[in-house]
Amino acid sequence: EKEMKELEYDGEGRNGGGTKCVEMGKWEMEVWYQSPYPEEFSRAPKLYLCEFCLRYAKSKQVLRRHKEKCVWKHPPGHEVY
C-alpha cells in the first residue's frame, strides 16, 4: 500500500522529483509520471533504456555495454507505449 501511495498522481501531471527524462534509442522523452523502478534508479535524473529488451540503466556507458551483449533484435510484443 505504501508503494502505491508513492505512485499517486501529484496533481500537476509531473513526477514527484525523480527521473526527469528517459532516453530510448534515438528518442529522449520527458517523464510525466513516476514508474515503479527500484529506488536507486528512480532518483536518477535520466534513465537509459534498451530499445529491444527494455532494460534500464543509469548511464549511457552501462547501456552501451549491455547493448553489446543483448540478444534481442526487436522489442517484446507488437507495440510499446
Image (cartoon, grey):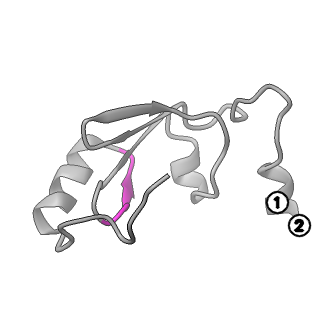
Q: Amino acid at mark 2?
A: Glu
Q: Secondary structure at mark 2?
A: loop
Q: Is residue 59 or residue 51 the one in the foreground?
A: 51
Position in image of residue 72 (x %, y %): 21, 71
Residue name at image x 24 percent, y 65 percent: 74
The quadrant of the image that shows the N terminus is bottom right
Position in image of residue 71 (x %, y %): 17, 74
- Circle on res. 22: none
Position in image of residue 51 (x %, y %): 29, 54
Residue name at image x 39 percent, y 56 percent: 56
Helix, strand or loop for the magenta stretch, by majority: loop
| 4 inside magenta stretch | no
Q: Which residues are magenta?
A: 53-58
Tag 2 residue: 1
Q: Amino acid at mark 1?
A: Met
| 55 inside magenta stretch | yes
Tag 1 residue: 4
Asked whether the residues under the numbered discs 1 and 2 touch, taking CB atoms below 8 Å apart as contact, a structural biologist would say yes
Q: Secondary structure at mark 1?
A: helix
Position in image of residue 78 (x %, y %): 38, 66
Residue name at image x 63 percent, y 52 percent: 35
Q: Is residue 68 or residue 11 the one in the foreground?
A: 11
Q: In this image, 29 relative to 67: left or right?
A: right
Q: Up-down: is 41 above or below 46?
A: below
